[in-house]
Amino acid sequence: MADHLPFINILARNGGVHPRQDPASFEYSYRTEITNVYPLTKAERLYQLQIIDPEERQRFNFRPGQFVMLEVPGIGEAPFSISSSSLRRGDLELCIRDAGNLTHFLSRMERGARVGISGPFGTHFPVENMVGQDVLFIGGGLGLVPLRSPLLGVLENRSRYGRVDVMYGAKNPADLLFTYQYDSWRQFDIHLAITVDKPDRTWRGATGLITGLLKARIASADFQPATTFAIVCGPPVMFRFVCALLTEAGLPLQKMFVSLERRMHCGRGKCCRCNIGSTYTCLDGPVFDYWTVMNLKEAI
């Protein structure tokens, strides 16, 4: 039994490898225990999982941007982006929204419950290629979930990167994710800017679309597109406006990376609901550089 993933690499561009998984890799599953559950909003919870077998725990590793298939026996399975640091190996975190049969069942599970995971699967954000460069993390809504893993990777190696900006937007303050970590992120010398579409009476931050935050950053004197990478996660419609602004500012399409994980359903390339022509988001993604996305008709 393989320790985690045999991959067949089918495309490499600017250091971002686009693997198509060997179907046999889906047969392998790790038994995990839910060690903690934290409510983040009314709909989202953060699940901390630990692989039960110590040897398997040491073998398990992933790259920021990859996903796992989570299975609850007798209920079903679904793909979820890993939202934790890749240095933690057999301990991982999944932020899951209560939005269907499986996730509703998960919302009632507590510490000590056991679930299965397979993976990790998919392409990753090439943060290793961003060393020595400025990095823009731009997230909208649930987009902060896949964004959090590469962000933590950069923060854990903060001295190796230039200026780091995190721009995050949500519909209203109650929808903001990981609010308890904002202050700790700021301690790593990052520029964190948050905006909401519909502020409540207690909101004292920026109001409006995330493009407003991005325009301000682009207009700043020290914005240098030649030495900047961008990672963008959120609703696909957001990609069009954010990446258009970055393109106008001179950032190459190959230096913008997006996750199309929202398109995934079965995670195995069987249901064909995530395919874009001959490209399957779950098999050839979910992370793509924006040059690839622009050449995939109806990708966003």
Image: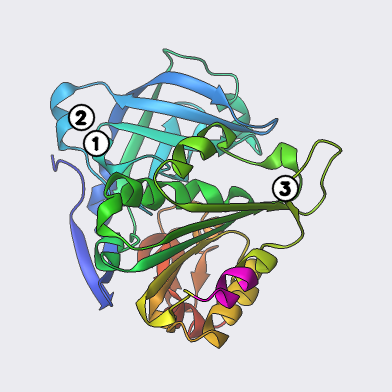
Q: Is residue 114 left or right of residue 30?
A: right
Q: CA distance from mark 2 to mark 1?
A: 7 Å
Q: Which residues are the magenta region? A: 215-221
Q: Mark 2 or 1 closer to N-term?
A: 2
Amino acid identity at mark 3:
Gly
Tag 3 residue: 205
**Residue at the image point whose x is 33% and y is 52% from the top:** 154
Residue 300 is at least partly visible in this image: no
Q: Is residue 154 above or below residue 108?
A: below
Q: Is residue 114 above or below residue 101?
A: above
**Residue at the image point whose x is 25% and y is 72% from the top:** 15
Q: Is residue 295 left or right of residue 2?
A: right
Query: Where's residue 199, x and y in %?
Result: 82, 46
Q: CA distance from mark 3 to mark 2?
A: 41 Å
User: Is disc 2 placed on a helix, strand or loop?
Assistant: helix
Q: Is residue 243 above or below residue 2?
A: below
| Of marks 3 and 2, the one in the foreground | 3
Residue 254 is at least partly visible in this image: yes
Q: Mark 3 or 2 closer to N-term?
A: 2
Query: Where's residue 59, x and y in %?
Result: 15, 37
**Residue at the image point whose x is 44% and y is 58% from the top:** 270
Structural crowding at the residue carrying mark 1, measured as other residues with C-alpha within 10 Å and reported as few (<14), some (14–19) or many (≥20): some
Q: Mark 1 or 3 closer to N-term?
A: 1
Q: Main secondary structure of the magenta part?
A: helix
Structural crowding at the residue carrying mark 2, measured as other residues with C-alpha within 10 Å and reported as few (<14), some (14–19) or many (≥20): some
Tag 2 residue: 57
Amino acid identity at mark 2:
Arg
Nearer the observer, 173 or 182: 182
Q: Quadrant of residue 245?
A: bottom right
Query: Where's residue 131, x and y in %?
Result: 26, 64
